[in-house]
């Protein structure tokens, strides 16, 4: 079982068990209005979960690998997940096609192009090294490929991309230390943090305290998943034991007023992914999503897609959902600036966008004079 695949499979298994299946997924791409896009920052997107059919097809052809369909339309059919087993098959098929540095670079560049069409100016892409290395990919091809892709994405699409490798709960500490060490070694090439995801509660976060300490000593941020599968005590544990600088999801903190107050005091940003939360049944329906409560309490919340190809969503759609929940686009963008792990010169650049943008609700541009 893969790290990110494990994470998603747990979440989709929950969704399937609840009878929701793919019903959470977007019925249609976000409307053209939303695509004409205010600036956006996305801090929580798994690169392996962004791969659309045209990217998969190009990579498979280059590597001379067979796929169940050889057209974009055929693969799009395949992507219409019907159940958990189907999901796992597609996940395995997709990630097993990634072999070379060029493949990893293409994944970043293609997603940056997509996100740019929705107004993205800055992305933090997550990737799961352990599963690829286990299939024979070299550490160098993996890290160099993703970092090359980040550089190329900025040159070609004007989107600044930084990267955060992800561990998974239950990974051997020795492997976790290796990922942390390599992540630090690539700091100058755009690796800005270390994360962890998967089955929350599978083991105590303290188990990885050494790996996260190593990353932080090396200048990286700590960006664990928490408060999605498990509740407030798990969020508390990643703050205390892993020195979390930001939390991926974190929405179940809403159940604990003391934790909310603490997150406000710390200024901890939560990377909230509405469609993902619906797909996995962490939240029963959009009206019950706790993000308005968290924002109103003073917690900065950024908005992301998590796994856009897997959950049938895109960045424009997520911001539109956030808008329906009453979130203010400008404030969401500012949460992104606050939470970004980039160097300060880049943060200043992102912050300057706030003043130079005419903010208006997503989907409703002001009338032309
Ligand atoms: Zn995630």
Image (cartoon, grey):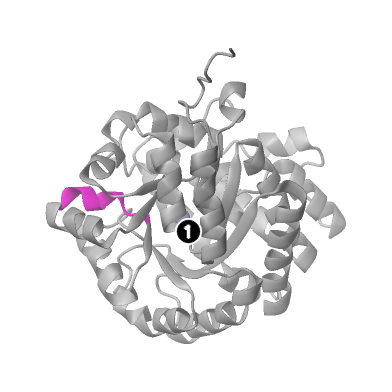
Q: Give residue 268's position: percent from left, percent from top.
A: 32, 59
- Toward which corner of the image does residue 203 lie, by quadrant? bottom left
The vertical placement of 283 against 197, above or below, is above
| Residue span colored magenta | 248-256
Q: Give residue 1's position: percent from left, percent from top.
A: 52, 65
Q: Magenta segment: does it hold 253?
A: yes
- Toward which corner of the image does residue 285 lie, by quadrant? top left
**Relative to 356, is 152 on the left or the right?**
right
**Relative to 261, is 84 on the left or the right?**
right
Q: Is mark 1 within 8 Å of ligand 1?
A: no
| Residue at left offset 30%, top offset 37% | 289
Q: Residue lying farthest left?
A: 258
| Residue at left offset 58%, top offset 64% | 163
- Is residue 327 or residue 6 the one in the foreground? 327
The vertical placement of 364 against 156, above or below, is above
Determine which residue is flagged by label 1. 340
**SS of the residue under disc 1:** loop
Q: Give residue 236's position: percent from left, percent from top.
A: 23, 65
| Residue at left offset 40%, top offset 74% | 170
| Residue at left offset 40%, top offset 30% | 323
């Amino acid at each position: 079982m893969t790290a990110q695949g494990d994470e998603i499979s747990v979440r989709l298994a929950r969704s399937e068990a609840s009878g929701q299946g793919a019903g959470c997924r977007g019925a249609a791409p976000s409307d053209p209005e939303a695509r004409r896009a205010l600036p956006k920052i996305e801090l929580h997107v798994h690169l392996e979960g962004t791969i659309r059919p045209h990217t998969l097809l190009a990579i498979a052809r280059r590597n001379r690998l067979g796929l169940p369909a050889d057209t974009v339309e055929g693969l799009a059919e395949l992507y219409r997940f019907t159940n958990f087993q189907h999901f796992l098959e597609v996940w395995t098929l997709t990630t097993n096609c990634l072999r070379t540095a060029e493949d990893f670079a293409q994944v970043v560049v293609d997603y940056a192009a997509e996100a740019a069409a929705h107004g993205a100016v800055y992305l933090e892409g997550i990737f799961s090294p352990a599963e690829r290395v286990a299939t024979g990919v070299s550490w160098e091809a993996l890290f160099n490929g993703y970092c090359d892709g980040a550089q190329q994405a900025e040159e070609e699409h004007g989107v600044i991309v930084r990267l955060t490798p992800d561990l998974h709960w239950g990974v051997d500490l020795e492997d976790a230390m290796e990922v942390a060490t390599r992540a630090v070694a690539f700091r100058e090439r755009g690796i800005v943090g270390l994360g962890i995801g998967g089955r929350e509660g599978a083991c105590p976060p303290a188990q990885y305290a050494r790996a996260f300490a190593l990353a932080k000593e090396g200048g990286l941020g700590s960006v664990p998943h928490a408060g999605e599968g498990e509740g407030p005590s798990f969020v508390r544990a990643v703050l205390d034991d892993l020195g979390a600088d930001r939390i991926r999801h974190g929405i179940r903190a809403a159940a604990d007023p003391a934790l909310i107050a603490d997150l406000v005091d710390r200024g901890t940003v939560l990377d909230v992914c509405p469609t993902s939360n619906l797909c996995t049944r962490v939240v029963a329906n959009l009206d019950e999503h706790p993000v308005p409560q968290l924002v109103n309490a003073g917690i900065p919340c950024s908005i992301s897609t998590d796994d856009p190809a897997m959950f049938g969503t895109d960045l424009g759609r997520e911001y539109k959902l956030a808008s329906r929940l009453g979130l203010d686009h400008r404030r969401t963008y500012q949460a992104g600036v606050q939470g970004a792990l980039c160097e300060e010169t880049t943060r200043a650049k992102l912050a300057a966008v706030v003043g130079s943008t005419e903010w208006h609700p997503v989907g409703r541009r002001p009338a032309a004079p």
